[in-house]
Amino acid sequence: MSSSAASSSSVLIVSSSNISNFLTIKLDRTNFPLWLAKIVPLLRSHNLLSFVDGSSICPAAFLTDAEGKLTKYQDQQVLSWLNSSLSSTVLSTVALSSSARTTWVSLENRYASQSHNRILQLRSDLMRTTRGDLSIADYLDMALGEIPWAELV
């Protein structure tokens, strides 16, 4: 095994032991954008985003060379990270996926459009919020209380 492959796998082993420190939220049907904001930088920082964005194809199971084994190991590590960051309800929808990429695509297909629709609805609600005869302070209190601003990010 090359030295870069050895160092790459040792980074993964160290990182996998404390993954819950980085992924403090579990994906559910309402928080896809927030979950993405956590998982994408984590994968990118470990040079593993390619396993979910489609730019790296995990080799077929029959490959036996060292690079193939490492790639399969990395894919399964990413799959494990993804699965550990999902609520039990969401996990049940992808439990049979055998690669990080298939899990990622399934999650995007299921939750990205819901999140986009929710953002559009929240923006519409915000635009319809009127001040009327309220003071500026009361209006802001009302708007800040009714609109879940974190969901618009």
Image (spheres, rainbow, N blue to C red):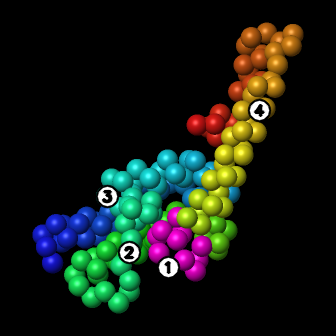
Give the mark nearer the N terminus: 1 vs 2. Answer: 2
Residues at circles 3 and 1 in contact by the CB criterion of under 8 Å: no
Q: Residue at x 65, y 72 (%)?
A: 93
SS for tag 4? helix
Residue corresponding to mark 4: 124
* Residue 66 relative to residue 109: left or right: left
Residue 150 in the image: above or below residue 107: above
SS for tag 1? loop
Q: Residues within 10 Å of mark 1 (few under 14, many from 20)?
A: few
Residue 22 in the image: above or below residue 103: above
| Residue 110: quarter of image | bottom right
Q: Residues within 10 Å of mark 3 (few under 14, many from 20)?
A: few
Residue 98 is tagged as 1
Give the mark nearer the N terminus: 2 vs 3. Answer: 3
Q: Residue at x 76, y 25 (%)?
A: 127
Residue 77 visible in the displayed image:
no
SS for tag 2? loop
Report the amino acid beneath label 3.
Answer: Asn
Q: Residues within 10 Å of mark 2 (few under 14, many from 20)?
A: many
Give the mark nearer the N terminus: 3 vs 4. Answer: 3
Residue corresponding to mark 3: 47
Report the amino acid beneath label 4.
Answer: Ser
Tell me where the magenta segment starts and ends, as one range.
Answer: 94-104
Marks 2 and 4: which is nearer the front? 2
Report the amino acid beneath label 2.
Answer: Cys
SS for tag 3? loop
Q: Position of residue 92 (x, y in %)?
A: 64, 74
Residue 58 is tagged as 2
Asked if the stretch drawn in magenta spans residue 81, the answer is no
Marks 1 and 2: which is nearer the front? 2
Q: Position of residue 118 (x, y in %)?
A: 72, 44
